[in-house]
Image (spheres, rainbow, N blue to C red):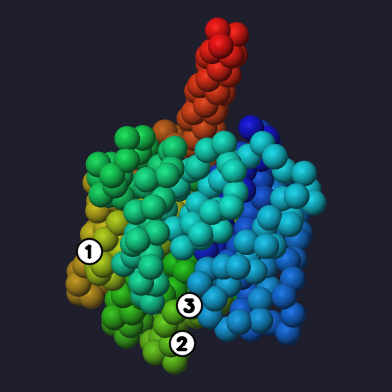
């Protein structure tokens, strides 16, 4: 196998998370073609191509229809774009990798050696989830050779739906987050204490907790780093001590996080967060920073001994207060505990383990094909 063709509902230049971490590493082994969902409502239909990092080529379709995502209105033109590009670039020996079941129809005319489904979220529970998503996921479970899940909760939910389901929780590049060089200029002028969050800001964030911290402690500076999506920005809590800084570069995140006294995971407890495994949790830990999370299962069960857990506004504020009251000795001891916790995981190890499973399945496919050819040749001679 020489190439991975990946279908993703997330754009490569969106928040740097699981797909980018894994695929940029797998690109040292195989060529990676990252097919994004289309950009709708364009003046002309075309396939944009660019290479954001070594070994990865992004294919970004532009379409004239207005429907969002991998909508049925786009399927025929997307199929043509992909088939033409595969032919032009002489891609013949490839696997297909899905991040969203909505892209399944695009592979109908393809001939991959194998199929991976990396289920990083329970997309069926997200706001505005397409109605076809469940049906297409059923097809994907039927056709996939390997299924990876983004955390223990998802693994337990999916493990009985396919014979080869493997749990690969969120991981971290510890070296990246331990190499901050000074405070980020967007927050360097803010006072202390600083409490911060980085990540997507959508229906999974409990805005009541953000508002409670800001109103009960006007002396706290609340720093919110990340794009606002799928919710009305006008509904965000607005106070002088809440700073909405928008999406920032992955390279800049360490300088933000290392400038915070408390890191926040203020997730709402709803259907959209039922199966999440937050990447930011380990990024906070890699910076040696204390954090407070609501009771997300994939936070509580593996890391509840090093992450403070609180759900109500009163308890969440109290948990932050308790962290801010720690002595320097307590802070140092906790940082050491965080370092021990993250030493057991890395994106490098996760990508290597995934690659080993793909290579094993690919070898099995080759051996099966060779056996079939040998049997066919024997039958031909007998005939």
Q: Residue furthest right?
A: 88
Front disc: 2 or 3: 3
Sequence-wise first label, 1 or 3: 3
Q: Is disc 2 placed on a helix, strand or loop?
A: helix
Few, some or many C-alpha atoms within 10 Å of disc 1 (few <14, some 14-19, many ≥20)?
A: some
Residue occupied by mark 3: 229
Residue that appears at 67% across and 62% down: 80
Residue that appears at 45% across and 47% down: 117
C-beta proximity under 8 Å, tags 2 and 3? no
Residue 33, image x and y in percent? 67, 50
Residue 105, image x and y in percent? 51, 59
Q: CA distance from mark 1 to mark 3?
A: 25 Å
Residue occupied by mark 2: 233
Q: Is disc 1 placed on a helix, strand or loop?
A: loop
Q: Would you say 351 lies left or right of 122 here?
A: right
Residue that appears at 44% across and 92% down: 234
Few, some or many C-alpha atoms within 10 Å of disc 3 (few <14, some 14-19, many ≥20)?
A: few
Q: Would you say 71 lies left or right of 331 here?
A: right
Q: Is residue 347 above or below residue 376?
A: below
Q: Residue furthest top?
A: 382
Front disc: 2 or 1: 2
| Residue 40 found in image quarter | bottom right
| Residue 291 found in image quarter | bottom left
Identify which residue, 77 or 313, lies in the foreground.
77
Residue 310 numbered tag: 1
Q: Is residue 177 above or below residue 165?
A: below
| Residue 159 found in image quarter | top left
Quadrant of the rendering where the C terminus is positioned: top right
Residue 246, image x and y in percent? 56, 76
């Amino acid at each position: 196998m020489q190439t991975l063709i990946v279908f993703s509902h997330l754009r490569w230049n969106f928040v740097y998370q699981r797909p980018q971490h894994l695929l940029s590493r797998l690109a040292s082994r195989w060529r990676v073609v990252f097919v994004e969902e289309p950009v709708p409502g364009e003046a002309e239909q075309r396939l944009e191509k660019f290479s954001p990092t070594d070994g990865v080529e992004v294919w970004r379709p532009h379409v004239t229809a207005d429907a969002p995502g991998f909508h049925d209105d786009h399927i025929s033109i997307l199929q043509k774009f992909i088939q033409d590009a595969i032919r032009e670039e002489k891609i013949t020996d490839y696997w297909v990798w899905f991040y969203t079941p909505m892209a399944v129809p695009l592979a109908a005319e393809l001939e991959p050696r194998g199929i991976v489904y990396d289920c990083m979220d329970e997309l069926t529970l997200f706001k505005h989830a397409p109605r076809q998503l469940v049906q297409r996921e059923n097809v994907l479970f039927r056709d996939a050779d390997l299924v990876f899940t983004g955390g223990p909760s998802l693994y337990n939910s999916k493990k009985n739906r396919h014979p080869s389901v493997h749990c690969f929780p969120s991981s971290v590049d510890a070296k990246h987050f331990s190499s901050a060089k000074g405070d980020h200029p967007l927050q360097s002028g803010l006072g202390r204490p600083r409490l911060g969050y980085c990540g997507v800001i959508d229906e999974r964030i409990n805005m009541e907790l953000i508002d409670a911290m800001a109103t009960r402690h006007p002396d706290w500076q609340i720093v919110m780093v990340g794009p606002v999506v799928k919710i009305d920005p006008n509904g965000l809590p607005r106070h002088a001590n809440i700073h909405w800084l928008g999406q920032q570069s992955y390279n800049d995140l360490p300088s933000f996080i290392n400038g915070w006294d408390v890191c926040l995971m203020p997730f709402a407890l709803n259907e959209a967060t039922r199966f999440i495994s937050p990447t930011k949790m380990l990024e906070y830990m890699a910076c040696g920073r204390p954090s407070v999370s609501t009771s997300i299962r994939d936070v509580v069960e593996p890391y509840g001994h090093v992450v403070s857990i609180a759900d109500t506004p009163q308890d969440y504020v109290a948990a932050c207060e308790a962290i801010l009251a720690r002595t320097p000795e307590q802070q140092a001891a906790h940082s050491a505990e965080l370092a021990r916790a993250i030493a057991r995981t890395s994106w490098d190890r996760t990508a290597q383990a995934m690659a080993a499973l793909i290579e094993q399945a690919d070898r099995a496919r080759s051996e099966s094909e060779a056996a079939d050819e040998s049997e066919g040749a024997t039958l031909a001679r007998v005939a």
